[in-house]
């Protein structure tokens, strides 16, 4: 394994992130004071500890860490695009993954922070007065996953922006400024005479102090953006990303190893199901987790024809001739 790799894909936690060198001069960020990494594992622990990354994925994750650039992960469903984020956070001890699932209605503001003026107004009315300049406005501001990732953590946080290809057409371009500056402003705070406030984060109820109404990162987060290839991205966006394409496992040995990693002894005597999966995959699109479901169910079900049962659990994700 090359010495420069911080993330190795070993699935064993270690302190390799301490060897991360200083960023390139054009990717230096001065947020502070530094915050410690929140306690807790990455989440999705089973997936993180059984994931088998390709050599290409390992290299590109490290490139994104060194260059302080977002990682755009493409590939068909079931190839582990989202799981890669949890695997990196688990191995490098980067704390819980911040997850931002994308839909067509999501805007940049949703990822940065949310402000609840109605609750603030209601609280003021119960106090027999309008919301005053000196009230605790931070109680009504909650940072989103992206906004939390850009706090001045001493170590990079892992942010999973899931299925960015489902976003509104403007979101990738809107992200460019944030990725370049590494900071953002909360206008509800900057308009105040006293712009410092204690606000909630996306880390399960934790709170932090925002000074001057601006949040700025210290260690640029590892931003993992997944895409199923449903749209193309503008060149300016792609130019600022490190990219990697994940592929479905192709051979019987590789698939069998994945099944053993996930199911242990339950994977015994599953070679026929692995071969069936590969046969069906030649006619249409399938995902590896369908094979895992089929192996688990066939191990427990008393089916007269286990291959027929497996076929029912592995429907094609795209059309296939004379099937499904």
Image: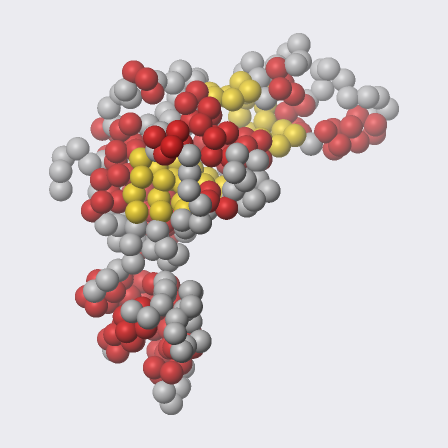
Q: Is residue 286 left or right of residue 135?
A: left
Q: Nearer the viewer, residue 306 or 15?
A: 306
Compared to 118, does 314 lie above or below? below
Estimate the x, y position of residue 4 in percent, counting from the top left.
Answer: 17, 33
Which residue appears farthest toward the top when viewing the image?
A: 193
Q: Nearer the viewer, residue 300 or 77?
A: 77
Q: Specify the quadrant of the image occupied by residue 318.
A: bottom left
Compared to 16, does 101 lie above or below? below
The residue positioned 57% from the left and 17% from the top of the image is 213
Q: Nearer the viewer, residue 313 or 202?
A: 313
Which residue appears farthest toward the front when viewing the image?
A: 321
The residue positioned 43% from the left and 17% from the top of the image is 32
Quadrant the N terminus occupies: top left
Estimate the x, y position of residue 225 in percent, counting from the top left.
Answer: 41, 41
Which residue appears farthest toward the right when viewing the image?
A: 128
The residue positioned 38% from the left and 18% from the top of the image is 29
Compared to 99, does 323 lie above or below? below
- Work out whether residue 209 can be spotted: yes
């Amino acid at each position: 394994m090359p010495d420069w790799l911080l993330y190795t894909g070993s699935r064993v936690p270690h302190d390799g992130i301490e060897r991360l060198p200083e960023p390139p001069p054009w990717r230096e960020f001065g947020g502070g004071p530094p915050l410690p990494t929140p306690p807790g594992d990455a989440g999705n622990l089973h997936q993180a500890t059984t994931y088998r990354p390709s050599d290409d994925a390992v290299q590109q994750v490290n490139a994104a860490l060194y260059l302080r650039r977002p990682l755009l992960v493409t590939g068909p469903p079931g190839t582990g695009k989202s799981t890669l984020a949890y695997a990196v956070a688990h191995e490098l001890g980067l704390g819980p993954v911040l997850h931002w699932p994308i839909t067509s209605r999501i805007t940049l503001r949703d990822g940065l922070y949310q402000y609840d003026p109605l609750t603030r107004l209601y609280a003021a009315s119960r106090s027999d007065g309008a919301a005053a300049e000196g009230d605790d406005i931070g109680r009504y501001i909650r940072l989103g996953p992206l906004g939390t990732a850009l706090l001045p953590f001493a170590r990079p946080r892992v942010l999973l922006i899931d299925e960015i290809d489902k976003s509104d057409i403007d979101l990738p371009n809107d992200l460019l400024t944030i990725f370049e500056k590494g900071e953002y402003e909360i206008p509800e705070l900057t308009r105040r005479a006293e712009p410092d406030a204690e606000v909630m984060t996306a880390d399960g109820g934790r709170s932090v102090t925002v000074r001057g109404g601006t949040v700025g990162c210290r260690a640029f987060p590892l931003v993992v953006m997944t895409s199923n290839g449903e749209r193309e991205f503008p060149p300016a966006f792609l130019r600022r990303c490190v990219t990697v394409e994940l592929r479905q496992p192709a051979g019987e040995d590789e698939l069998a190893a994945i099944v053993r990693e996930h199911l242990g002894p339950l994977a015994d005597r599953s070679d026929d199901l692995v071969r069936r999966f590969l046969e069906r995959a030649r006619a249409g699109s399938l995902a590896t987790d369908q094979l895992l479901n089929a192996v688990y169910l066939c191990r427990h079900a008393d089916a007269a024809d286990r291959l027929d049962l497996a076929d029912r659990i592995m429907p094609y994700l795209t059309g296939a001739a004379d099937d499904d």
